[in-house]
């Protein structure tokens, strides 16, 4: 009996196909819906131009049929001077010509808008073909021969094989079996699929996502999408932020994951594994109200992390993960978005574990609701997803219910080192725990709590800083719930010291965990608020 004959396995395969098709519908359907607004606007502009042209041509025709025009053309005497009639004639003709040109331009714009919409709709149609082709492989009794593709894009067996793979390892094996030419064809034909499939090597995913991003930049989608595309291109071209996943048109919000590695930039003519030789892999998981248009500060933190790892003798690869629909103040008390986000993050971390060097140390840092999501993903997995260190900063609280349908299943962080911090000035994190995710990550058995309220790094001789000697680096207090200089409440001035900002005690301790396995400051140490209050 083959594994697919087992009903549970068949249902699992069906579920994966449906989820993939749903993602494709969100991507291409979302684009098509946005472009339909352009079509509607172009139709209105065309109709307006047509009306203007009809009026201008009617005025010209009326003028040319008038007695005054006939007399003037015949050289007869007229009440108006010849110069006046010449000017009138030119005005009518110029108006008609201008209107006709505007109409032609409006019709061309409408044609282009329809073509752009039809392109996205055809991608949607192709996604349906891929889903049907995948269904045909689930059970031999399913006859998909009559509906296994489209006229323009028949079912693609190599694509189907990739879509049917169960794990990143199986995807990698299927990809490795393809020729270079076939890989290039699949990436060019299905860039959204290749760019987001765990198990396909990162260099191919990055190239596919860059192609999608650059193509999307050629069309105006309106905000926030246009601004998000602009910010992602800045990260790519100026800071080396490589898109290892990308979905600009998710129905809720655009999502992406950007990879930063020192000295690695995107070169379409020379694809290479960006994780080769990496010793430390870090993933920053964004929290409540995180949007792609704010990804720049996080990219700066990623670069800073890599710099400190290099100073410690390692090679860092840091990923900024804005890969889920983050909650707002109204929806934050629920765990619903954490569950969906954790399911997505689970797949991403499994793919990362397969792609990263086997001896690399992996650290996941979740801020606010991002910690709710990250801890749920790692704690629900039997194999901890390859995560060595799990850090919560300004956590909105955790749930102990594991992912899945078993109401009695509980999270388990065995095999993962857990760290946590919450600034004394971060009231928002504590308010977030007055909810169905009430658990302080610092209360987990074996968790190590570190300070984020200011202080000093160890003295130059390695001793603890004291009033008498504190020649280490001064560290900032985190002044609220923010990750960088935003604080808790937006103010017209910077509020430095955010959890992920270089120079804060929180960030210094995160670096200590990544490079040495432990925080660098002692709780309540010299210079901290606790010490000063004591």
Image (cartoon, rainbow, N blue to C red):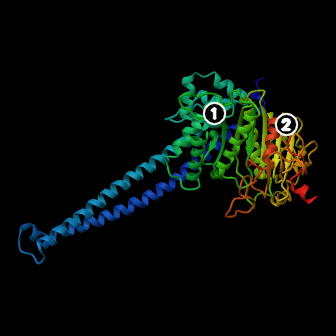
Q: Residue at x 77, y 30 (%)?
A: 360
Residue carrying label 1:
263
* SS category of the residue bearing label 2: loop
User: What percent of the width, then of the height, locates residue 399?
Assistant: 86, 50
Residue that protrudes farthest toward the front in the picture = 468
Residue carrying label 2:
517
Which dot marks residue 252?
Answer: none
| Quarter of the C terminus within the rendering | bottom right
User: What percent of the width, then of the height, locates residue 174?
Assistant: 66, 25
User: What percent of the width, then of the height, locates residue 285?
Assistant: 74, 46
Lower sequence index among marks 2 and 1: 1
| Relative to 529, 358 lies left or right | left
Q: Residue at x 91, y 60 (%)?
A: 533
Q: Residue 210 falls in which quadrant of the image?
A: top right
| Quarter of the N terminus within the rendering | top right
| Relative to 53, 41 lies left or right | right
| Relative to 91, 407 lies left or right | right
* SS category of the residue bearing label 1: loop
Alpha carbon separation for disc pair 2 and 1? 25 Å
| Relative to 486, 110 lies left or right | left
């Amino acid at each position: 009996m083959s594994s697919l004959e087992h009903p549970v396995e068949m249902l699992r395969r069906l579920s994966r196909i449906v989820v993939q098709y749903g993602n494709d519908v969100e991507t291409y359907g979302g684009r098509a819906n946005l472009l339909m607004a352009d079509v509607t606007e172009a139709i209105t502009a065309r109709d307006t131009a047509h009306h203007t042209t009809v009026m201008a041509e009617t005025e010209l025709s009326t003028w040319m049929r008038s007695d005054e025009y006939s007399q003037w053309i015949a050289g007869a005497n007229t009440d108006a001077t010849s110069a006046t009639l010449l000017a009138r004639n030119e005005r009518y003709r110029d108006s008609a010509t201008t209107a006709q040109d505007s109409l032609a331009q409006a019709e061309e714009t409408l044609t282009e808008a329809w073509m752009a919409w039809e392109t996205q709709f055809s991608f949607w149609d192709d996604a349906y073909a891929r889903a049907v082709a995948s269904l045909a492989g689930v059970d031999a009794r399913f006859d998909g021969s009559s509906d296994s593709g489209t006229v323009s894009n028949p079912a693609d067996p190599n694509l189907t094989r990739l879509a049917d793979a169960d794990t990143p390892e199986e995807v990698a094996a299927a990809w490795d079996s393809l020729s270079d030419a076939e890989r290039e064809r699949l990436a060019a034909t299905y860039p959204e699929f290749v760019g987001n499939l765990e198990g396909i090597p990162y260099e191919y995913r990055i190239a596919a996502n860059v192609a999608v991003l650059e193509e999307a930049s050629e069309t105006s989608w309106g905000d926030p999408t246009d601004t998000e595309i602009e910010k992602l291109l800045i990260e790519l071209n100026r800071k080396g932020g490589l898109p290892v996943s990308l979905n600009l048109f998710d129905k809720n919000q655009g999502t992406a994951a950007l990879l930063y590695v020192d000295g690695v930039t995107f070169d379409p003519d020379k694809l290479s594994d960006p994780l080769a030789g990496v010793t430390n892999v870090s993933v920053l998981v964004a929290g409540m109200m995180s949007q792609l248009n704010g990804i720049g500060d996080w990219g700066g933190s990623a670069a800073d992390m890599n710099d400190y790892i290099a100073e410690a003798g390692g090679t860092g690869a840091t990923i900024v993960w804005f890969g889920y629909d983050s909650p707002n103040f109204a929806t934050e008390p629920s765990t619903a978005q954490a569950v969906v986000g954790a399911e997505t993050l689970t797949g991403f971390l499994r793919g990362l574990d397969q792609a990263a060097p086997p001896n690399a140390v992996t650290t996941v840092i979740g801020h606010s609701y991002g910690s709710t999501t990250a801890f749920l993903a790692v704690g629900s997995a039997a194999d901890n997803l390859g995560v060595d260190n799990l850090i919560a900063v300004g956590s909105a609280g955790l749930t102990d219910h594991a992912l899945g349908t078993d109401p009695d299943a509980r999270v388990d962080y065995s095999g993962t080192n857990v760290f946590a911090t919450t600034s004394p000035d971060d009231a928002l994190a504590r308010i977030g725990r007055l909810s169905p995710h009430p658990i302080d990550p610092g209360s987990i058995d074996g968790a190590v709590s570190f300070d984020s309220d200011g202080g000093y790094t160890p003295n130059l001789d390695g001793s603890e800083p004291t009033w008498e000697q504190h020649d280490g680096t001064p560290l900032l207090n985190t002044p609220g719930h923010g990750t960088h200089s935003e604080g808790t409440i937006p103010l017209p001035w910077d509020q430095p010291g955010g959890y992920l900002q270089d120079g804060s005690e929180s960030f210094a301790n995160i670096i200590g965990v990544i490079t040495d396995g432990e925080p660098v400051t002692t709780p309540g140490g010299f210079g901290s608020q606790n010490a000063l209050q004591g």
